Amino acid sequence: MPSRSAKPAGPAPSTLIDERIATLGDWRGALLGRLRALILEARPDIEEDWKWSGPCWTHAGLICTGETYQRHVKLTFAHGASLPDPSGLFNSSLDGRVRRAIDFAQDAVVDGPALQALIRAAADYNAGKA
């Protein structure tokens, strides 16, 4: 009998994320791939996971999820309301008491350094809670 902490059999989360990006085959896949690269560059110790039918990134807890919709790609930060956002990246779920999100439209300009600072702040926030 497998232990409770054992990962279920199946493709690795990184493989599932690769497949999602490839399956989209349009601007959303390209953007999700770019956001993924920025996230992983921000903190090499971030882990990729697959939950709620989509990609997510963790470090001592959930950092953010990556969701794709018809008109935008969304990064939802689990504890976004507790994070500093001096660049004003959060533009969605602003009324939530815990989460915050960033919606990226097709023509969005991604501020890579600001996003990476937000990712690092989220990882540090999670590490401080642990």
Image: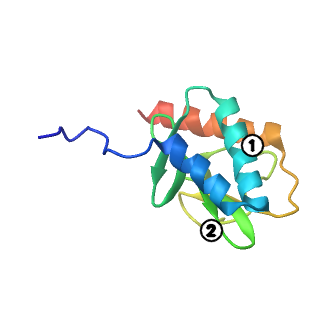
Disc 1 marks which residue? 115
Report the residue at 75% width, 72% height from top.
Answer: 71
Colour style of the rendered protein structure: rainbow
User: Based on the displayed image, in which of its 4 quarters is residue 9 positioned?
Assistant: top left
Q: Amino acid at mark 1?
A: Leu
Dot 2: what SS? Answer: loop
> Which residue is pictured at 66% across the width and 65% down the height?
94
Q: Residues within 10 Å of mark 1 (few under 14, many from 20)?
A: many
Asked whether 34 or 24 is in front, the reply is 24
Disc 1 or disc 2, which is closer to the eye?
A: 1
- Residue visible at 76% across and 53% down in the picture: 31
Q: Under tag 1, what secondary structure?
A: helix
* Residue positioned most to the top: 44
Q: Where residue 67 sits in the image (x, y, percent)?
A: 61, 61
Residue beneath label 2, please?
A: 95
Residue 72 position within the rendered picture, expressed as x and y whole percent measured from the top left: 73, 67
Query: In this picture, is 53 found above or below 130?
Result: below
Q: Quadrant of the N terminus?
A: top left
